Structure formats: C-alpha cells, structure tokens
Image: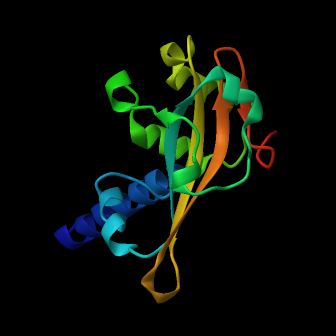
Amino acid sequence: MSYLNRAKKWLLGTFLVYAVLVSTNLGEFWPFSIYPMFSQAGNPWVRAVVREIPDADAGVVSWEPTSRDMILGRPFAVGPTGINQNDVANFVSKSREWTPRRTEALRRLFHTNLTDRTLLIYRVTGELGDNRSISVRYEPYILMTPDTTILHPEVSP
C-alpha cells in the first residue's frame, strides 16, 4: 500500500471520527469548541444566572421577562459551591425537552445547596440589536425549592 493511500485512509478516518463526535455533542467537541466564541461574534447567546430568593417570594414569581435591575433575590455564586457555571448554562440553553429525568439531573447539580434555600434560575438571552446596541433579556426559567422544581410554563413537560 502506498503512503498516499494510507494517508487518505487516515485522513478519512479522522474526519469520520470528528463528524461522529461533533454530531453527538450538539456541535461542540474540544479543541474546536473554543474557537466559535470568536468566529460567531454578534450572534444571539444564552447564559444562566442563578439567584437566591427568600422563601416568601417563591410563591409570587412572575414568569415574565425582565431587565437586570428588576430580577429577584441576591446572586448565588455557583463556583464556590462546586458547580460549574457552564453546566448550568448548558442545561438552560440546550435542553429542548424537560423530562422528569432531566429535571432531576439539574436538581442533583445543586443537591446540597437546596436543603435550606430557594433558587431561581434565569435564562439570559442577549443579542446585537440595531445601531450596535445590545439587548439582554432575563427570563425566570426554573424555580427550585428544597422539595419542588417548577419550570417556566412554556417549557413544562
């Protein structure tokens, strides 16, 4: 077998493995996943913000989008509690169907932090608007109490 044929087979095999890995991971496969943040500037983005709210406010959560100045509660720092911010953002941005299994997986991510507090996860959507202005919208998405998880009415199963 010539070197050219062997190189073609290796190259084809590499592209095939890459295609399988990318297709099963929603288009992300390290080391290539770090570059789109530069090449996709200006595209809409979705992140997550976690807030700790008093138990008394849990029953009065409005599911309407709001601005940063009007979000409830105080910031809940996920890093010091051992939760990766990207994991929370991926749950919020990539979950198309919220099955009981997916909801329980999110609760497990926050496991010990839910024993004595109520957390409200906001879905934060940003996009570049007219005249290069940035539009950021905070939408209450998931309310987690020590014993209950309530999803935004539009995404509830």
State the residue at coordinates (51%, 25%). Answer: 109
Above or below for 67 versus 119:
below
- Quadrant (top left, top right, bottom left, bottom right) of the N terminus: bottom left
Residue 141 visible somewhere in the drawing: yes
State the residue at coordinates (74%, 46%). Answer: 63
Residue closest to the eye, 50 or 25: 50
Q: Quadrant of residue 32?
A: bottom left
Residue 101 visible somewhere in the drawing: no
Residue closest to the eye, 59 or 119: 59
Q: Position of residue 126 (x, y in %)?
A: 51, 65
Above or below for 102 versus 48:
above
Colour convention of the picture: rainbow
| For residue 124, side relative to residue 39 (left or right) | right
Q: Position of residue 69 (x, y in %)?
A: 52, 53
State the residue at coordinates (46%, 56%). Answer: 22
How many marks can you see?
0
